[in-house]
Structures are given as structure tokens and as C-alpha cells.
Image (cartoon, rainbow, N blue to C red):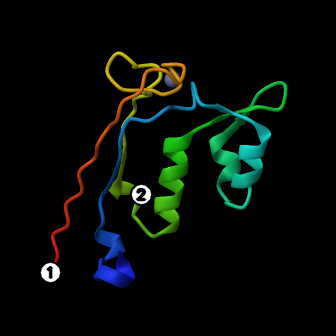
Amino acid sequence: MESELGANVSQLLAAIGPAIGPCCYRVDGEVFREFKKFSWAEKVFHPLKGGSYLLDLPRANYYQLREAGVKEENIFLAPLCTSCHCQNFFSYRAGGGVVTGRQAALLCWRGK
Ligand SMILES: [Zn+2]
């Protein structure tokens, strides 16, 4: 956005909507190894017995935005896990891969 559209990253606002939370998103070591290239990887993986991890995916997106230069105070995280709140949100994992749906997000760009 900065190079192609002339966006001022320091003025960007970012909102990370409801997503599966670290309470429910269990991944295996292969996922962890893929993320190890990121300096913040240790902050978003919580090891479990048996070599699996709980992954804080919203927080991983937060760190990516921070690395891109978005100010901490301009990033908003929805504190809702879609799997824990599957009565309100679609959750592939909570639905066992059978119940599916989609969520949408809107983006507004106010150019110069
Ligand atoms: Zn959860």
C-alpha cells in the first residue's frame, strides 16, 4: 500500500476481526517450524505435550502489521474466538470441517 498507493503507514488503522483464538487453534510442529523465520514466532506459539502447539493467529497478524510499520495504537484486535463462539461465527474447526460459512470484512481507502 505504501509503494503502490502512497499510503502513509504511520496513519493506517488496522482491525483484526474475530478469528480462531489461541484457546482453540492447535497446530503441529510443522506449522511452528514454518513460522520460526519470524522474530515474533515464540510469542504466538504455546507448546503442548506431545509436540503440538496452540497458535495465536490474531496476534501473529498483529506482529506482521507492526513489522510493516503500523503503529501499535492503530491496531485493533477483536477479543473473540470463532471456535468458542461458534453460535455467532462460522468456525471450520468447531464445525468439524462439515459446517462451513464465510465471514466478510470491509476496507475503506480515503486517498489523497
Ligand atoms: Zn477458543
Instruction: In the rendered view, tell whether residue 25 sits above or below residue 76.
Output: above
User: Residue farthest to the right?
Assistant: 50
Instruction: In the rendered view, tell whether residue 21 sits above or below residue 34.
Output: above
Res. 11 image quadrant: bottom left
* Mark 1 residue crowding within 10 angstroms, few (<14) / some (14–19) / many (20+): few
Instruction: In the rendered view, tell whether residue 100 sits above or below residue 40.
Output: above
Residue visible at 49% across and 52% down?
Answer: 61
Q: Looking at the figure, which quarter contains the C terminus?
A: bottom left
Residue 52 locus on image (x, y percent): 77, 31
Instruction: In the rendered view, tell whether residue 26 sits above or below residue 58.
Output: above
| Amino acid on which the number 2 mark rests in the picture | Glu
| Amino acid on which the number 1 mark rests in the picture | Lys
Residue 30 locus on image (x, y percent): 77, 44
Residue visible at 44% across and 35% down?
Answer: 19
- The residue indicated by pointer 1 is 112
Residue visible at 36% across and 30% down?
Answer: 101
> Reading the chain from its start, which is encountered first: label 2 or label 1?
2
Residue visible at 83% across and 32% down?
Answer: 51
Q: Nearer the viewer, residue 89 or 11?
A: 89
- Count of residue discs: 2
- The residue indicated by pointer 2 is 72
Q: Looking at the figure, which quarter contains the N terminus?
A: bottom left
Residue 42 locus on image (x, y percent): 71, 48
